Amino acid sequence: MHSLSDSRTKRLLDLVVLLLDARRPISLAELREQFGEYRTAKPEAGARAFERDKATLLEMGVPLKFVTPEEDSESPSEGGYLIDRQRYRLPEINLTADEVAVLVTTAAAARSQNEFPYRHAAEMAMRKLMFDLSGLSSKPRRRAKVAPPPPSGQEVVLHLPTVFRTGALSEHLEQIQEAVHLRKRLTFEYDAHRPGSQSPVQFATGAGSSATATTDALPGDSDGELTATSSSEPREVDPYGLVYRQGAWLLVGLCHRAQAIRRFRVDRILKLTVAPKPRTPDFDVPKDFSLHEQGAISPWRFEREPPLRAQLWVSEDTPWVVDEDFGPSQRSKAEHHGKLGCIVEFDCRNPDYVVSRVLSAAGSLCLLSPPVLRQRISDAAATLARRNADHGQSVTSDATSASASV
């Protein structure tokens, strides 16, 4: 946010008050009569001054909008401006002590990350919450039974995983969150593979072919291209939002190369550039876009190869695989080798990830179909067994788990 002079700050406040108190939309001609900065010798100069003020208010989150006579019969013939009161004035929120404590803990976790672009805002919000907490009534409220608090003197411990960083993560996060707010297009190079990760496992997928499986548990990107291996080709993305998931920041937006919504890990973004003219938006976010839904997509659903309809059995001992990774997918209760669980159906476009997850699940996951993917799991298990043949019992255990998985 650029610094504002005292006179301009007063003008912006006066403009907000005027538009909030207005009973109908106010035209630019009427605003010229109220503000000398808009009443210039050349009308174009006054209009530009108003456009700058309007852009600043929108950037600050003031829901200023232009209303035509077709939208409101009381609007002037040339249209007018007003502030949406319902969006501008938020209802009062009453929080209990437990709810405030949860929010304070969450804010503390966010503040502990040096790269978090809203650390100062989190600090201010936490101070306000602590002030409100001191004024809460001591009268008990009827609430659902909750777990008892930790013993006196025992602190809450939060574990934040360490992930690879390009060295410019904090700067990139600030640029991206500003671009999201102003709806500005981003251009960047993307490193789709994290340097320093463990060596991949090669396994046979058929005659004369091979594939690679890794066990990176952090969320990656989904670029939707089956053969794209170069990370140097610039990508243009309309940023719709930022998500923090499993220790990594994800940029969610429209990738122009894929012509679809994609997710990119911010710590793998290189040479980031924001489109010029910050006051002019480059795109509109679709009305049906859900950041929660798009940001929660797991590697199970990444698009690496043509889709294969798959059935995956999930043991009742690992229900989070269904609840967190697949969301509202088709599922049904089923037994497998006498163990309770459920079956999830989905379009598999990331078979390498499926192979690595099934092999590492020690029998809690089993791929039921399609046969071609089951064969890839069997081939990968055989390759691992041959590679570790000198480890005796561990090989037998791994082979047993792999056979149960297919």
Image: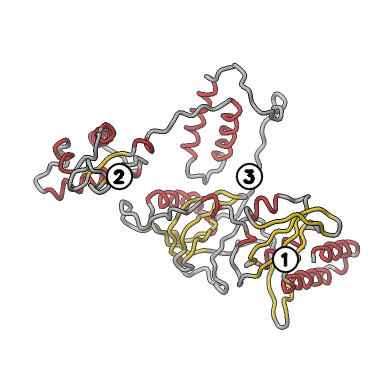
Q: Secondary structure at mark 2?
A: strand
Q: Residue furthest left?
A: 41
Q: Residue placed farthest to the bottom in the image? A: 208
Sequence-first tag of 3 and 2: 2
Residue 29 falls left or right of residue 9: left
Is residue 28 or residue 394 the one in the foreground?
28
Disc 1 designates what residue? 355
Tell me: residue 337, above or below residue 11: below
Q: Residue 89 appears in which quarter of the rendering?
A: top left
Q: What amino acid type should be assigned to the residue bearing mark 1?
A: Val
Residue 32 position in % (x across, y down):
15, 40
Of callouts 3 and 1, which one flags the residue occurring earlier in the amino acid sequence?
3
Residue for point 23% across, 47% down: 69
Q: Which amino acid type is marked by label 3?
A: Leu
Marks 3 and 2, how far apart at CA = 41 Å
Residue placed most toward the observer, 258 or 273: 258
Q: Which residue is mark 2?
A: 65
164 left or right of 119?
Answer: right
Q: Quadrant of residue 360?
A: bottom right
Q: Please state the horizontal and vertical placement of residue 1, each as a whole percent of the image.
A: 35, 43
Residue 394: percent from the left, percent from the top? 87, 61
The structure residue drawn at horizontal position 46% and vertical position 50%, both measured from the top left corner, is: 171
Dot 2 or dot 1: first in sequence order is 2
| Residue at which label 3 appears | 160
